Image (cartoon, rainbow, N blue to C red):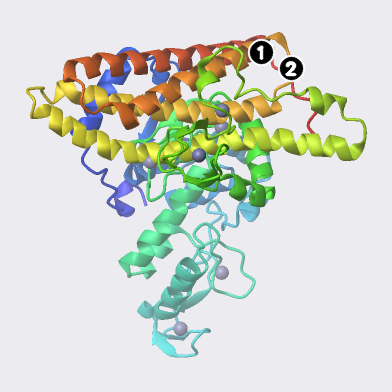
Amino acid sequence: MDSSEEYEDSGNESSGEDVEFAMERDDRAANERNPEDDYPFSVLSTKDIVEHMVDSIREANTVLQLPPTTMRILLNHFGWDREKLLEAYYDGDQEQLFRDARIVNPTVTRAPVIIPASGVEECEICYLTKRSEMMYGMECGHRFCKQCWSEYLTTKIIEEGMGQTIACAAHNCPILVDDKTVTELVTDPKVKLKYQHLITNSFVQCNRLMRWCPSADCTNAIRVQWVDWRPVTCACGFTFCFQCGHGWHDPVKCQWLKKWLKKCDDDSETSNWIAANTKECPKCGATIEKDGGCNHMVCKNQNCKADFCWVCLGPWDPHGSSWYNCNRFDELEARSARDAQERSRAALQRYLFYCNRYMNHMQSLKFEHKLYASVKDKMEEMQQHNMSWIEVQFLKKAVDILCLCRQTLMYTYVFAFYLGKTNDSAIFEDNQKDLESATEKLSEYLERDITSENLADIKQKVQDKYRYCESRRQVLLDHVHEGYEKDLWAYNTTIL
Ligand SMILES: [Zn+2]
Ligand SMILES: [Zn+2]
Ligand SMILES: [Zn+2]
Ligand SMILES: [Zn+2]
Ligand SMILES: [Zn+2]
Ligand SMILES: [Zn+2]
C-alpha cells in the first residue's frame, strides 16, 4: 500500500451546512473571543485521517524504507511515535524489535516458498487439495487456501472486531496480518470498510493529538497541536473539551468534572429523584409540572397562583435582590456538625444542594431546545410584518445565548461543590447569582412575554437582555480563569 487509494473512502460527507447556522457563526465570531485564535485545531474526516496515516507512514519510510504495510504495524506498535521507532530501530536489537512488533524481519532474505512440481497443495485448515494459485501465505510461510483465509479474516474483523491484532491463521504463529493481505483476500466491501475503521480507530486512539468527535453518529476526528483543557468545535457543530472528550464544561476543570460525574453515577438514585419533573406547590400543595426551561413557577391552581422558585421552592420575588441566596449553600451547619452521623447528613445535604442546581440547569437546557421551535414560528410571523430574514435573527441568537448560559451555570455548580471558602469564592458566588438571575429573566421573557408588544420594541429588549447575560457569563468565566492562573482556588476540605 503506497497511496491512500488502497483505503476506500468511507464516504463521510458532512451534511450541507445550514445557512442559518453559518450566518450565526459569523455573528458570534464578531462579538466574542474566538477560541481558535489561541488554540488551533483542525477537523478531520475519515478520508483525511487515512491520508494523514499514509503520510505518517511515508514520512517514516523516507528514513527506513520498509514495505508500507510493515511500517504501519511498526508505527502502531510505537503508538505512532516516529522518533521512538527510529530510536529503537537504530539503538536496539532489530531482531527483537521485529519480534516484539510481531513482524517477520523484512531485512533478512528468506528462502522462496517452494511450490510443488505437481502444482497442487493441501490446505491445513480444510484439508482440501487445491492448485497453488488458490493458496496464500504471508512472510511467515504458513500457507492456506484463499477461501479459508477469507473466512478467517472475516470472522476476526466482523465478529471479534479485530483490526490491528489479527495473527496468522496458523496455530501459535504470532505474525500479524498486514493490510496487503486483507485487501487481497477479503472481497466483501462491508468487511473491508469495517477493517479500515478499525485501523483508523487505533491510529486516532494512539495519537495524543487526535480525538474522535464524541457526538453520536459523527465520524470526524479533531487534531490539535498540543493537548489542553480547551474547547474544540467539530464540523457537526458539537463543542467539546479536547483534553477529556466531554461536552465543553467551562468553568470546571476536567479532573473535578470526572469526580463529579462518578459521584452522580454512584448516587444515581438520588439524581433520578432530583430530576423528577413534578413538585408540589409550596403554598397550596397542588402538583406542578415543569414543561419549560424557566424556573419562575406560577401555581396553576386559580385560587393560589403562588409565584415560587422551582429550585429552592422559596418565593420568587426576592430572587433578584441582594440578600436572597438561591445559589449559595449555607456551610455553617455543616461546619458545626459534631459527630460522624451529623457530618455525613450535612455532607449529603450539601451534595443535594449542588446536584439539584446542576441537574436543574441541565434539564432546563433540554427544555430550551423546545424554545427554538417556538422562536422559529415567531420569526416567521415577524417576517410577514415587514422585517427581513436578517433582522429577525436576533431571536435565534437569544436562544443560543440562553443555552450557553445554562450550560455554564450547570458547570458552575460542579465547580462550587469542590470549591473551598475564600474571598474569591464569595466573588464567584456573586457572579454566579448575577448570571443566574439574568439568565432566568431572559428565559422567562422568551418563553412567556414576547406576545403582543410591537416588534421593534421586542427586538431592543431581547438584545439588551441577551447582551447582558453574555457579559455576565464572560465576567464569571474571566474571574474563574484568572483564579486558575493565580492559583486562587482551594479544594473544599469538608467533602467526605
Ligand atoms: Zn482451506
Ligand atoms: Zn504464520
Ligand atoms: Zn462531530
Ligand atoms: Zn475536559
Ligand atoms: Zn399553589
Ligand atoms: Zn430559588
Q: Is residue 71 above or below residue 147?
A: above
Which residue in the protein does label 2 denote? 421
According to the image, label 1 marks what residue?
Answer: 426
Q: Identify the residue at image location x=78%, y=32%.
A: 495
Q: Could you say which is closer to the camera, residue 223 or residue 479?
A: 479
Quadrant including the C terminus: top right
- Say left or right for 427 vs 310: right
What is the tally of numbered marks visible in this picture?
2
The x, y position of residue 465, in whole percent, is: 35, 16
* Quarter of the displayed picture in which ligand 2 can be seen: bottom right
- Per the model, the C-alpha gap separating discs 1 and 2 is 7 Å
**Residue 89: quadrant of the picture:** top right
Residue at image position (27%, 43%) is 14
Q: Residue at 43% across / 29% down in the picture?
A: 232
Ligand 6 neighbours mark 1 (CB distance < 8 Å): no
Residue type of the residue flagged with mark 2: Lys
Picture coordinates of residue 21, whole percent (x, y): 25, 31
| Residue 371 or residue 474, whichever sits in front | 371
What residue is rendered at 29% in x and 15% in y?
A: 461
Q: Residues within 10 Å of mark 2 (few under 14, many from 20)?
A: some
Under mark 1, the amino acid is Ala
Q: In the image, residue 163 lies at what x, y percent? A: 49, 59
Please give left or right for residue 243 compared with residue 496 in the image: left
Crowding at mark 1 (Cα within 10 Å: few <14, some 14-19, many 20+): few
Quadrant position of residue 35: top left
Residue sitting at the far right:
339
Residue 322 seen anywhere in this rendered image of the structure: yes
Q: Label 2 near label 1: C-beta < 8 Å?
A: yes
**Where 106 falls versus 383 (above or below)?**
below
